Amino acid sequence: MMEELKEEEIVNKVGGRFKLSTLIQKRLVALNAGSRPLVKIDTENKFSIVLQEILQDKIYLDASNEVRVTGDDQGPELDLTKLDPTDL
């Protein structure tokens, strides 16, 4: 489990040690709050789950340092209350 953190591959994949620690911390919070794992591995260790999610390119940090799931390109939600009906 900790061996993965010693490898430069995972550090480079995320973009540095600070981003790696941020991604791990935020994803652990999400898993502890009830999010489902995105990988199937035979462990209940959430830290190992997060590392595998990173190594399998399932999660990443976006430009605002928020955790995103690969393929989840929904972008910001559109607020329809701010639309002017005359613009339609």
Image: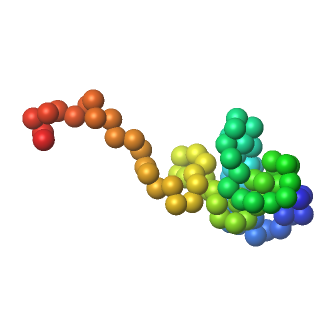
User: Where does residue 14 sit, x and y in percent of width and height?
Assistant: 67, 60
Q: Quadrant of residue 16?
A: bottom right
The residue that appears at 69% across and 38% down in the rendered structure is 34
The residue drawn where x is 26% and y is 31% is 82
Colour convention of the picture: rainbow
- Which image quadrant is residue 38 in? bottom right
Check the image and report above or below for 81 versus 10: above
Task: Judge left or right: residue 45 versus residue 36.
Answer: right
Query: Is residue 29 in sight in this rendering?
Result: no
Indicate whether 68 appears above or below 79: below
Compared to residue 77, the image places residue 10 above or below, namely below
Q: Is residue 36 left or right of residue 74?
A: right
- Is 76 left, or right, of 16 in this rendering? left
In the rendering, at what x and y percent does residue 18 appear?
A: 72, 51
**Residue 48 placement, left or right of 65:** right
Count all numbered tags in the image, as a single digit.
0
Question: Which quarter of the image is occupied by the N terminus?
Answer: bottom right
In x, y percent, where is residue 2? Answer: 89, 58
Instruction: Give the x, y percent position of residue 7.
Output: 83, 67
Q: Quadrant of residue 59?
A: bottom right
Q: Quadrant of the C terminus?
A: top left
Q: Is residue 10 visible?
A: yes
Give the residue at the far left of this rendering. 86
